[in-house]
Amino acid sequence: MSIQSLPFVGFCAATLALYYLLPRARQNLLLLAASYLFCISISWRFALVLLIMTLASYAAGLGSAGKKRPRLWLGLGIGFNLAVWLYFKSAAFFIPQISSWLAGMGWDDPGRVLGILLPVGISFYTLQAISYLLECYRGQIGTPPSLWDFALYLAYFPKLTAGPIERPRDFLMQLARPRTVDNELLARSFYLIVLGLVRKIVIADTLLAAMPARIFIAPADYSGIELASWLLAYAFGLYNNFCGYTDIVRGISGFFGISLSSNFSRPFFSRSFGELWNRWHSSLSHWLRDTVYFPLSRFLLKRDPGMKNRANIMLPPLAAMLASGLWHGLAPRYLAWGLVMGIYLMAENIRSATRPARRLDRMPRWRQWLSTARVMGLTLAAFALFSMDPPVAGRFFLRLFSFAGWTLPGSRVFLVMIPSLWIDYVQNRHGDDFAWLAWSRPARAALLSLAVLAIFLWSQTKVGEPFIYQGF
Amino acid sequence: MPTEKNRTLKLERPFGRTLILSLAILAGLVAAAELLLRWEPLQSRLPYPSFGNNSHQLDIKLHLLDKMAERDGPPDCLFLGNSMVQAGIDPDAFNETYREITGHTLRCFNFGVLGMAPYAGATLIRILNRSYSPKMVIWGISPYDLKTDEKNKQLALENGNWIRFQTGEWNFGGWLIDASYLTRYYLRFRLWLDFPRIDRVIRASERRWSANGFTRGRHGSAITDPGQREREAKNKEAMRDFRINQRVLSMMHEAFQPTPGVTCVLVEMPIHRNYAAENEGGKKNYEKLISLIHGFAKRKNIHFIQSDPQNTLSDDQWRNSLHMNSIGALRFSRWLGRRVGAAVKQGAIPAPQRFRPRP
């Protein structure tokens, strides 16, 4: 059941109707049951993996928050979660290779025997389970939650498949207190869903579907301008795909009165890499900051508290971005991408350690735009690494800068980017995701009609592109 | 049930006003778009609308025929068939010789569509008769159409909503396409989304299309071009192993129903002698196929005109073994006009009713 399918709409509507009818005390249980039902609709095996990880993490959480060997419980809990995640993640990486090797030896259909699928959302709920264990250990969660609430924290169906990665405190606090859905929240949630569908169906699907199948396989077949244009299209496609997904699930969750993190905040307007990572998949960035960057930095500062501690300047961003690459997948391309992103952040850290810090918004406008262009250009280069293996990426860059050929992709690639830029521009200008809600009623209604019309026109084409981050 | 105090959903009236307003705007937009798209000056600036068939050529033909009927009145005569008809029969040249023989002029439209299966022609006769009531349909079939070839995928029409609607099977989608220009342009937009290059393909072929549906074939001949000889040799070889596609034949029998008031003439579309005459197997196959088509025409009581390409067309009048070039088409169309005219004059086929006196 994809979140972009009619059965899912029916499922949400039924859950919502029951949710509003039930007294508050039962609502969390209903959401838990609905979340597991949703997971089972994809595969009962995935639900089993989720259940096992939930029980193990809850037990380890109780131990970590207790007084007897909390460190051991913490280690066991994190170790267990990481081991399960690594098992499935590495299976996804190695099984096709082992499978082809066995097939080469004459084994009949080894893929069927070795068929291990990456449980949906495991990369997301593993991180949340680790966050929970750490918060228990640090005593940041006062009273341990009930098993049901904790299970719901990991399994909550709007965020199960691709996040956002919620901080345990914030989410569990919302589960503990009464929730109200009023006119404003309903309007905001509806608005988010419409915006998410526009991003996903109108922008992302069009861009990703238009991409030539071999652009990241045989870059030599394309001109430098084509490669640059498609790379830009890929970045916009990926952004709108994931941001659209996040908006939709935030909207759905809003109907239940539960707020989820925004994850994206106009990343292509970033003026530095630090800012970029606060704007792009920020729930993962925050997790990496809380779990990798800050602990490592604290450890290094304990050894040398000076401002010019080189190790502290260089290692935490590198480690955090390498961890991010690893989280995306156990393939060289993700590690290369993480390494490059880490180097960008490291360079920024070195620069700010050697020169006096200056607030980005106090810089002249032209310098801000220049910084945005620099960050955008370098981020695109990293996207190239993200989307193909390093040797192909090498050929891609050689071709990109060879300036051979002047063929351009069709104009619609660029036309589709305009609504994305416009949405981001309006949100960025007002510093608010809901900037349109301040418009007059007729203007809002006209915009809504156009959005609905666009969604209808584009959604009828063919099977949409999948939500990319559901694959991680 | 939760008590008032305990309730999660707390809506205050009024609510949903923006939503209602946006629905009203949406309805207004749809109505305005429907009206705008019916406006001729705008239509001429837009790409051809689609009827949701799996052939953009069929869409274009339907659109051109619609425009012709609006401009000059419904056609007297339609030419149906595949690309051989499309590039092989020029309605103007046909009319010229027909008028010489009968003294009457016919308003003709070429409805040949690339890759159309022969039995689809039978379905089209019924559909086009509903909207345009032509008095005569000239249905072009070649022996090649009856060849067994898995790769030779022919355009079947029976799956489209609009086609099903037109053939009497009511369905909402078909009705909507039939009634609404907005739906047709929406389908065209979908085609553009799914096949981004469709515009380029259509624009390239459009240049050779006339308002009467005839597609002028390029000058020059692949038959006499040494660079194309290898390809032509392959075509020749294919004809040697010719087998009859029984499915196509039986579907032709099944699909064709005599339409009251419409005179149907079956015409053998010529293929180059490379296919038929030069090898013994090919010759035998050709004769067998012609007798099958002849038998079909006799059973269905259709007038059949067999072509004589050897005497009619020389090598430089073929674009390739299956298609005539513009000179060949001119010559063949004139020949056909004479044959049909003579048949009408002799009373072998009834004279179409919508004749107009010579201007």
Image: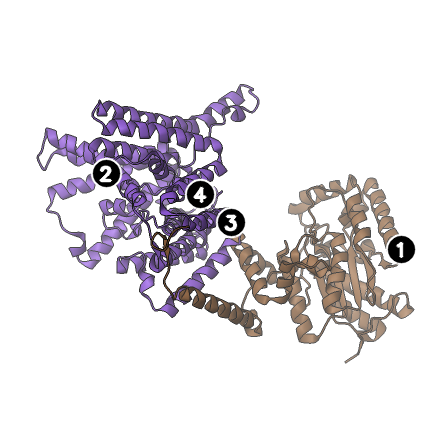
Chain colours: A purple, B brown
Circles 1 and 2, Cβ within 8 Å, touching? The answer is no
> What residue type is disc 1 on?
Lys
Pointer 3 indicates a residue of which chain?
A
Judged by depth in the image, the label closer to the viewer, 1 or 2, is 2
Q: Could you tell me if residue A297 is visible in this image? A: yes
In this image, A53 relative to B28: left or right? left
Q: x%, y% of residue A200?
A: 43, 51
Q: Secondary structure at mark 3?
A: helix
Give the residue type that dot 2 points to.
Arg
Disc number for residue A289: 2
Which structural element holds mark 1?
A: helix
- Which of the labelled discs sits on residue A6, or is there none? 3
Q: Position of residue A121 (x, y in %)?
A: 40, 37
Give, as a three-letter code, the residue at label 3. Answer: Leu
Percent across and percent down for residue B3 are 37, 53
The answer to whether marks 1 and 3 sit on the same chain is: no
C-alpha span from label 1 to label 2: 85 Å
Name the chain under label 1.
Answer: B
